[in-house]
Structure formats: C-alpha cells, structure tokens
Image (cartoon, rainbow, N blue to C red):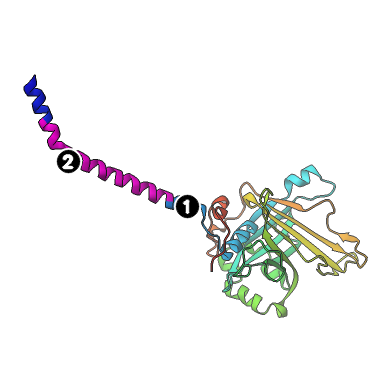
Amino acid sequence: MCTGSDSGLGSDSKSDPDSNGWSRARGAVLKSLVLVGGALLLRRLTKSTTRWDHARIVAESLNGEKFSKEQAARDPDNYFNFRWLSCPAADMVDGSKVLYFEQAFWRTPHKPFRQRFFMVKPCAKELKCDVEELNRSMKLSTYAIRDAEEYKNFCDRPRDQRPQPEEVIGFYRYVQDIAEHLTTIHLKRCERGKRCLYEGSTPADGFPNSWQNGATYCTSELAVLKNNEIHAWDRGFDDDGNQVWGVKGGPYEFKPAPSSSFNDVLNPLSFASQPLGKRIEGSFVLQE
C-alpha cells in the first residue's frame, strides 16, 4: 500500500507541469472568447446608422402595398378603405431614393386617383437625423406626374413595360420642366417612447395648392411606424385658414397587406431588406 502510494505521488509529480500548462492555455482561450464576445456585443450595441441608412429605412417603409381597411371599418363615415401602392423607381447619386406611388379605392386598385413620385433625401451629412431645422432635416418630397398615364400601374407591370430607371432619374434632373413639386415633408426620428420611428410635416404655412374647394394651400403630415405602417394626413385650407378638403379627425392609417398582390422582389431596384428592428438597432450616430 505504501509502494502504491509512493508510486502515485511520483506519477502526480511528473504530470503537474502538463496539467498546469493545459489549465493556463484553457484559461487564455476562455479569456479570449470573453473579450471577443464582449467586443462583438459592444459593436452591436453601438452600431451606427448613417444618414443613407435613415433614408433607406424610410423608403423601405413607404414601399409596398398597404390598406386603410381597419380604420375604415372603425369609422366608415369618415374614412375609406384606400389602397396604397409604392415601389422603388431609382436611386440617385446623392443617396436619395425615388419611389413611384399611387392610391386607389380597394375595389378598383388598377384605377388610381392619385399618382406621385416620392423622393427621400438624406439629412445633412454632419448631423444626426433628429434635427428640426428645415434646411438640414431628412426630406420627403412629393411630385405630381404630368404624364400620369405613362406611369399608371407602374408597380404592377412587368419590368420590361416600365419606364426605365434612367428615365426616372432624368425626370428629377429636369423636374421643373416635366413635373410639379407639391410638398416637402421634413422628417426626424421620433422621441423615445413614441410608437413611430420617424415623423414630420410640411412647414406651418404649407405649400400653394388651389386644386379644389377653394383651397389656397395644403399641409401634409407623415409618420413611419414599425412593421412598415404609414400614417399620412393631407389637408387643404383657404385664405382664412379653414380646412376645405381632407379628413379632419386624424391621419389615414395604412397597414401592410397580409399578402401583396405584387412581388417587388423581382424588381432589381428593390432596396436591400432586413427586419426593421435590426435595421434601426443601436445608436443613430451618423457617419460619413
């Protein structure tokens, strides 16, 4: 028994260096894993969102087929079930996103009564997208299309039957000649605790508009919510400040259709997509 004990002690004494070395190596590996994991977590938590990211997020939220069905069911006396349909049209060299938009009654989706181009312009490069200054904020400009028939049902058409992206880009280069600017909404990030991601409006005095009911100017408000829901409120006023067109109770609430009747994945200009929560997580510090 003593011999066995001595033998055991001798064996342990020979294995100590290897055992200690392995323990040190294992500890170093674990420490490295912790450091790497911590660095990745920190990077994830502080991931920056550039001004182009903000413009892309807004454009992606505007994109797609949406309906005001739920709102119309709650308040049929004041709201209709409208179909909102928008899709990418072109990317501008300054990072602006151009989308085609049309609105129709849900029963007659291919007979739009409103056709527009949206242009989402990034905010100024030196700023976060949470400023209120009108000349520095992210902008959503709306343009009426003079030749509306040419673009009618743009999103529902096969690609080879749509105006080419180069033509759309040219449209904005020569916008004063071939289109009419209607409004520009100045967007900023929503404050913490709000349901929205971005919100904004036109200036208080709006933009000239004399299209109907004696209006002399119009205003627009827009909010981008999670899950690509859009709240939009357009109103017209006369010289005395009386509202003469548009709903009075609040914005239209457009929610994405459960299954869209068109698939813009086939569109080569579709903006890169990922879950909205992933797109906006982390800080919003802008980088050049």
Residue 227 picture location, percent across and down: 62, 49
Instruction: Judge whether residue 128 is colored magenta.
Output: no
Q: Quadrant of residue 199?
A: bottom right
Task: Answer left or right for 42 relative to 11.
Answer: right
Q: Quadrant of residue 184?
A: bottom right
Q: Earlier in the sequence, mark 2 or mark 1?
A: 2
Q: Residue at 58% of width from left, 65% of height from top?
A: 51
Q: Is residue 132 visible?
A: yes
* Amino acid tagged 2: Pro
Task: Answer left or right for 192 relative to 80.
Answer: left
Q: Which residue is mark 1?
A: 42
Q: Is residue 107 visible?
A: no
Q: Which residue is mark 2?
A: 17
**For the magenta stretch, what is the residue range?**
10-38
Q: Residue furthest left?
A: 3
Q: Nearer the viewer, residue 158 or 252?
A: 252
Q: Residue furthest right?
A: 240
Q: Residue at 13% of width from left, 35% of height from top?
A: 13
Quarter of the figure that contains the N terminus: top left
Q: Residue at 64% of width from left, 78% of height from top?
A: 173
